[in-house]
Each structure stands twice: as C-alpha cells, then as structure tokens.
Image (cartoon, grey):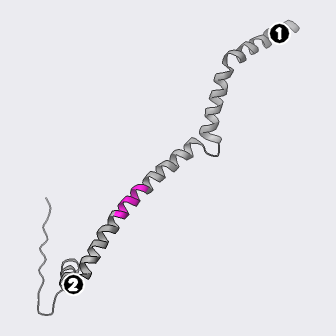
C-alpha cells in the first residue's frame, strides 16, 4: 500500500514541480479576466464607453462653436435675423408669396 501511495504521490510531486508555474499563471489570468473587481472584461467595456463619450464631447464642442458663431451673426443686425427667419422657417411679409422647389433625388 505504501508503495502505491509513494508511486502516485511521486507523480503528483513531479507534475507539480514541472507545471505549477503554468498552472498558477493560468489561474491568475482566469482570475484577472473574470473575477477581479477590475476585471479585463469590465475594463474593456469602460474603455469603449470612455472612447465613445470623448467622441461625443468633440462633436458637441464643434456644434457649440458653430451655434455660438451663428448666434453672434444673428445678433449682429436685423437683416441677418430676417434672412435666417426666411431661410429656416419660411417666414414672409404679408404681401409676399413663397414658392418652394423640391428637387427629387435619383
């Protein structure tokens, strides 16, 4: 009985001494990927969300600049305000008629 035990235990001991580093490394990677508080999956999702939010920030900064410029132009005079109202909202004076030409795309 002792010989069988020594034979089995000896093989386990050889296995553990040869491959224990790899087993620990694999367990560490599994732990970091799935179970840790700052696991790789959540981290990847958060990095993706951060990238998306930074792109949105750039877009809204550009829109803000354009709208600020447009607002400054509109506030510069009555002619600019009237031009904007006519072009964007099709406003007209009482004695005018507006004809809209809509072009169909091919």
* Viewer-side label of 2, 1: 2
User: Measured from the top left, where is residue 3 in percent x and y?
Assistant: 85, 6
- The circle drawn on residue 36 is none
Determine the image quadrant of residue 30: top right
Q: Nearer the viewer, residue 58 or 25?
A: 58
Q: Are marks 2 and 1 in contact (CB under 8 Å)?
A: no
Is disc 2 surrounded by few (<14), some (14 to 19) or many (20+) residues within 10 Å? few
- Say which quadrant the C terminus sits in: bottom left
Mark 1 = which residue? 6
**On the rendered structure, is 8 left or right of 68?**
right
User: Residue extending furthest right?
Assistant: 1
Determine the image quadrant of residue 21.
Answer: top right
**Circle 2 is placed at which residue position?**
77
Decide if residue 1 is in sight here. no
Whole-number angstrom distance, CA of label 2 to CA of label 1: 98 Å
Question: Where does the N terminus fall, quadrant-wise?
Answer: top right
Q: Residue at x 21, y 84 (%)?
A: 77
Residue found at x 35% / y 60%: 59
Q: Secondary structure at mark 2?
A: loop
* Few, some or many residues within 10 Å of mark 1 (<14, 14–19, 20+): few
Disc with the residue nearer the chain's start (2 vs 1): 1
How far across and how far down the image is residue 44, in percent? 51, 45
Position of 2 with respect to 105 (left or right) is: right
Magenta span contains residue 60: yes
Q: Which stretch did the figure color magenta?
A: 54-61
Most frequent secondary structure within the magenta stretch: helix
**Residue 89 placement, left or right of 96:** right
Q: Secondary structure at mark 1?
A: helix
Q: Quadrant of residue 20?
A: top right
95 w.r.t. 35: above or below = below
């Amino acid at each position: 009985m002792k010989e069988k035990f020594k034979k089995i235990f000896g093989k386990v001991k050889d296995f553990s001494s040869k491959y224990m580093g790899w087993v620990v490394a694999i367990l560490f990677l599994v732990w970091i990927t799935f179970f840790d508080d700052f696991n790789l999956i959540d981290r990847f999702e958060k990095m993706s969300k951060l990238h998306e939010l930074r792109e949105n920030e750039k877009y809204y900064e550009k829109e803000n600049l354009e709208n600020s410029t447009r607002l400054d132009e509109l506030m510069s005079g009555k002619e600019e305000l009237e031009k904007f109202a006519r072009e964007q909202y099709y406003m007209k004076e009482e004695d005018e008629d507006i004809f809209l030409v809509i072009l169909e795309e091919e």
